[in-house]
Amino acid sequence: MLDTVDPRQWDFEEGYSPVVVLQRGGSAQAAVGVRPGVVRLELPGDHAVHFDVAGRIINVQREGVSYRRTLDNRLLASRRVEGRGWSRQPTPDDPLAFLASEHAHARSVLESADRTGTIRVIAGRVGDPVRWLHAHLDRAAAFDREALGRDGRALRRLYLPIPILPPDQYASLVVQVSEGCAWNRCRFCTFYRSIPYRERSVEEIVDHLDAVLEHLQGTVERLHRVFLGQANALLVDNEILLPALRAITERLSLLPADLHGRAKERFQAEHPRWIDGVYSFIDAFHRSKTVDEYRQLAQAGVRRVYLGLESGSRRVLEVLGKPPTVDEAVALVHHLREAGIATGVIVLVGAGGRSLAREHLEETVAVLERMELGRRDQLYLSRLVIQEGGDYEERARRDGIEALDRGGQDQQIEAFRTRVGAGRRASFPIAPYDITLSRSIVPLDRR
């Protein structure tokens, strides 16, 4: 039986249409809605599953925990904590079985729709709701454990690990133009230790891009940014980067930066595979490009880069294992701004421990003031995570550096927010950057 009812009878997530509700015995069993590139299946209680148009799970929201499947076939579990952003959560013992069980909900909904029951359409136009449900859930229903395994093996062929992304790039399409980290000696970072540094050729990058787009198919319609990996991808020469960026924007329509309002909405409607720009990490201690070279990248679509300043103190940087290139970092931000590229600057909270805490704060604030960050820029405060037995812990022990505990880091975060915010001429966002989320991602087939 088909009824059309008042949308207020189901509190579905905003932004999805149509919304179809299945009922049996007077109680709702599930609701399904769509937006470009995403199908959302809501189940009773605090439980929702998001699929891409190829049927793969994007993420699961369940009992306050978000489980996100990454492009390199791993699982991230996190929970939003009041006043602290997202907090790492334990992943299921068998991640593959967990995702297979979530895919099974799509099969159950289709079986229910094929039997007797009430289907209520509360948003959008649906001619035949049962057929509509099959059109949007059949692919998701086909993903059992075996299919997930095949898909995971395909993703591993496409991608090297994606160990870390900036917080605002988690929903980006990653294109790997280089491999590993050209420095790879920071004592606090082990993300690229086992990956030799190598720059890919234009042909390799284009082949990689095409293979990724072929595998993801219509799901790219939900990915509106491109992030270049791994590590500092902008080290790659413009003779390679510019053709690679042209290949990206030939396949994914680049939203003009000056479009706003209805003109922007019209462009997005006319170009389902649109991106608002290309993004990447950068460092200040390798050869910097000229302003003209950065301007070429900006014109080709690069909108923002992410710079790991970590500290303005040369002594703290030495403890961290980073070159003391503070002046170079300031100059780089100015050159990027002149070229039309925004910067996300990352500061490491707790770096240098208690003994260097004041110096870390004072000298970092001074460097940030010299950078003159503007409205398009961003400051990220990332807590130092000390790995037991790691290089940083060994160096800190040798130098008698006592780590800041959580409370001490909280105080330093507040001090940074207060000091950086005081008297600045332009308002730019200050946000947390939690690398523990990246370190908590586990392979789906880890067993």
Image: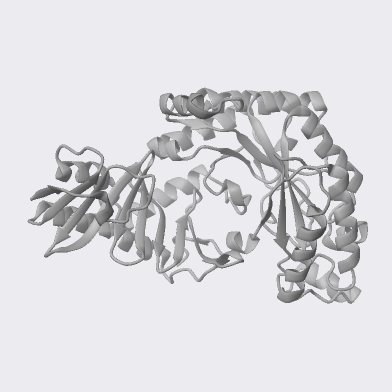
Up the image or down, 430 lies above or below 179; here it is below
| Spot occupied by residue 174 in the image (x, y as percentages of width and height) | 56, 41
| Spot occupied by residue 314 in the image (x, y as percentages of width and height) | 92, 56
Up the image or down, 130 lies above or below 364; here it is above
Q: Quadrant of residue 320?
A: bottom right
Q: Is residue 54 visible?
A: no
* 19 to the left or right of 229: left
Q: Quadrant of residue 248?
A: top right
- Between 239 and 409, the one lying in front of the other is 409
Name the residue located 29 percent from the left edge and 61 percent from the top edge: 43
* 267 to the left or right of 418: left
Name the residue located 58 percent from the left edge and 46 percent from the top edge: 169
| Spot occupied by residue 368 in the image (x, y as percentages of width and height) | 84, 49
* 251 to the left or right of 28: right
Up the image or down, 369 lies above or below 404; here it is above
Name the residue located 76 percent from the left edge and 70 percent from the top edge: 411
Q: Is residue 81 visible?
A: yes
Name the residue located 42 percent from the left edge and 24 percent from the top edge: 270
| Spot occupied by residue 369 in the image (x, y as percentages of width and height) | 86, 48
